[in-house]
Image (spheres, rainbow, N blue to C red):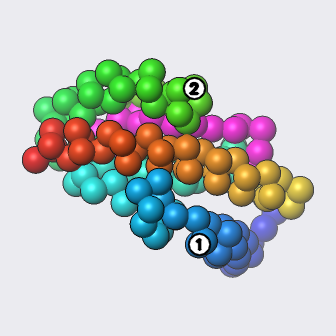
Amino acid sequence: MLSKEERKERNTRFWTAFKKEMNSIKSSNGRAINWINYPSDVKDVYIRLEADSEGARLCFDIQPKDDGIRSILWEQMTELKRVMEDEVGEASGWNEEDRYFNGRQVSRIYWEDASLNFFKNEDLDKITAYLKEKIIAFDTFYQEYKDILVALAE
């Protein structure tokens, strides 16, 4: 079992290395991008990369204060499901009411490899490869369709 300080150090090392690995890769629109803090350009929509003892995940979280806007954005994503999954791969989960975060209902679409464990050294390269593959594929989809979401959220 790692101490809190050791977990923090491992986390920092991994994400720093991941950022360095991704640094030379441009978005499908040709621009430089911060892959770890992927810009959704839609208020209260977040693209998150996660790795822990339960797996590695790419998450698309919709969490506006207004449930009506969340519902509209969710509906649009379900309409784009086929084209998105053709690009990124079949999502592990589509949860319209996934959880509450900071008092807001969160809708989450996610891709996960639950066989990976962030705390096993032999899995770190596999986690990097998995997240890299998923975020690049997601970017290809998202750059094509994000204007729809931006317009709906305004």
Q: Return the x and y of residue 151 as percentages of the image width and height.
A: 15, 43
| Structural distance between the alpha carbons of marks 1 and 2 | 26 Å
**Nearer to us in this view, 123 or 33:** 33
Q: Residue at x 47, y 49 (%)?
A: 139
Highlighted range, magenta: 98-117
Dot 1 or dot 2, earlier in sequence: 1
- Looking at the image, residue 147 sits to the left or right of residue 122; the answer is left
Counting from the top left corner in percent of width and height, residue 112 is at 63, 38
Q: Assign a secondary structure to mark 2.
A: loop
Rendered-image quadrant of the N terminus: bottom right
**Residue position marked by numbered label 1 in the rendering:** 23
Horizontally, is 35 left or right of 105 in the view? right
Secondary structure mostly taken by the magenta-highlighted segment of the chain: strand
- Relative vertical location of residue 77 with respect to residue 41 in this rendering, above or below: above
At 79% from the left edge and 58% from the top edge, which residue is drawn? 124
Residue type for callout 2:
Glu
Check the image and report above or below for 69 versus 41.
above
Disc number placed over residue 153 in the picture, else none: none
Is 111 within the magenta?
yes
- Identify the residue at image location x=32%, y=39%: 145
The crowd level at tag 1 (other Cα within 10 Å; few <14, some 14-19, many 20+) is few
Q: Is residue 100 visible?
A: no
Residue 26: where, in percent of width, then height? 52, 64
Q: Residue furthest front?
A: 30
Q: Return the residue found at the far right.
A: 122
Q: How many marks?
A: 2
Of labels 1 and 2, the one closer to you: 1
Residue pointed to by mark 2: 90
Asked whether 124 falls inside the magenta stretch, the response is no
Residue type indicated by callout 1: Asn
